[in-house]
Structure formats: structure tokens, C-alpha cells
Amino acid sequence: GFLLGQPRGTAVAFGLAGFAFLVGFVTICSHIAADSITPMGVTPFTPFSDRHITYDVVTAKHTVANYLLLVVGIVAAAGAFGLAQMAV
């Protein structure tokens, strides 16, 4: 609470920190998932596994797919911002 300029207490600060962690985790996972639909794919478990994952749905240069993913990302970010505002 204090670091955010809000006198709401430690519980709210920890709640927002947990929410921020969740948003970051989902962001990283969605980026890896988006990379996996390209022919290049991903190797997400390096150095523990050499398993390569690709679904070869669209190329990385596919304009429509990139704009669609951009819109999905903007909507998700706006939703996360709205949820964070409700928590404060």
C-alpha cells in the first residue's frame, strides 16, 4: 500500500503483487504459445529437454494473425488494468 501511495495496508500490497505476478506469468506463457503456432516453433524446456514444439499454423510474417494477436493482447492488458483498478 505505501509503495503505491495508498494507505490501504500490507494485505492489499501483497494482493497486488500476486496479481502482478499472475499477469506476468500469463503474459510469458501466452507469448510462448503464440510462438509455438509458427513454423519456427519453440523449445520451452531447454536445457531440461530438447523437445521442440510447433503447430505450423501461420508464419511469423502473417499480417492478419499478427494484428489479431495484437488486439487480443490489448484487450487482455485493458482487462488486467481494469481488474487492478477494482482491487485498489
Image (cartoon, rainbow, N blue to C red):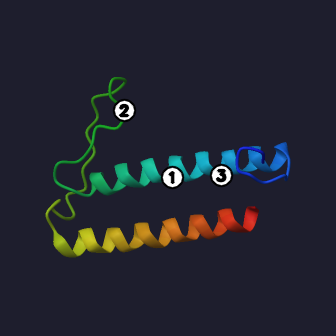
Can you give x and y, in whole percent of width and height, for residue 1 in the image?
78, 48
Q: Earlier in the sequence, mark 1 or mark 3?
A: 3
Three-letter amino acid code at the position of disc 3: Phe
Which dot, 2 or 1, sits closer to the camera?
1
Can you give x and y, in whole percent of width and height, for residue 68 in the image?
31, 74
Three-letter amino acid code at the position of disc 2: Phe
Q: Is residue 13 toward the left or the right of residue 43 in the image?
A: right
Q: Secondary structure at mark 2?
A: loop
Q: Is residue 4 toward the left or the right of residue 20 in the image?
A: right
| Distance from the alpha carbon under mark 2 to that under mark 1 | 17 Å
Three-letter amino acid code at the position of disc 1: Val
| Distance from the alpha carbon under mark 2 to that under mark 3 | 25 Å
Residue 19's disc number: 3
Residue 45's disc number: 2
Q: Quadrant of the C terminus?
A: bottom right
Q: Earlier in the sequence, mark 2 or mark 3?
A: 3
| Distance from the alpha carbon under mark 1 to that under mark 3 | 11 Å
Q: Is residue 6 toward the left or the right of residue 49 in the image?
A: right
Residue 26's disc number: 1
Name of the residue lying farthest toward the front? 5
**Do the numbered discs 2 and 3 sit on residues whose CB atoms are within 8 Å?**
no
Q: Secondary structure at mark 1?
A: helix
Q: Quadrant of residue 48?
A: top left
